Image (cartoon, grey):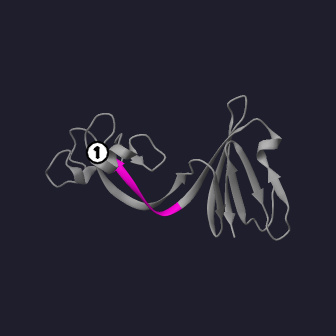
Amino acid sequence: MGGIDGLRTVELRTTRLLITDQDSGRSIDVGSQSNSQVQLSVWDPVAIVYVSAGTDGASGVVDVDDDGNTVVDDVSELGATGSDDRVLTPEDSGYQDAQSGKILAMVLSHGAMKRVEGDAVISGPGQVRIDLVDNDNRLTSRIIDLQ
């Protein structure tokens, strides 16, 4: 993808991506440059980020009192160093289960990238991530600031 100074708008239409500098009117039509699959994500400062138990189902390292509170594998140990616990953002599988309480999870922080579904026009200020997958299944990602 070429660069545009003063980026203002990103427009996603089905599988075509048009990036426009509204001050100069210059645009890049990513869809016309290749047969890439295009995915657009935007920064959501209030999106919840969870930490959940990993494949072993235990908080922290299994059978270890990671936080020294004399209770082994309690919820306060989620995300312990050396564990298989996972961080889940809105783009990750398992996120909906953490959100609904179907899996053991707790809120870690707020702020994450979220996929844009369907047609959209995103204007600044803010950040967007553009993921392109080409015909050889190679992924190219760019994070750009919208002014």
Identity of the residue drawn at 22% across and 42% down: 64
Residue position for label 1: 60
Is residue 86 in sight in this rendering? no
Looking at the picture, tell me which residue is in the foreground, 97 or 55: 97
Q: Main secondary structure of the magenta part?
A: strand
Q: In this view, does 94 lie above or below 10?
A: above
- Which kind of residue does numbered mark 1 sit on? Gly
Where disc 1 sits, the SS reads loop
Per the rendered image, the range of residues in magenta is 44-52
Relative placement, left or right, of 108 versus 147 is: left
Relative placement, left or right, of 87 versus 139 is: left
**Is residue 120 magenta-colored?**
no
Q: In this view, does 74 lie above or below 133?
A: below
Identity of the residue drawn at 82% across and 57% down: 27
Q: Where is residue 104 in the image (x, y as percent from the top left)?
A: 26, 45
Q: Position of residue 136 (x, y in %)?
A: 72, 28
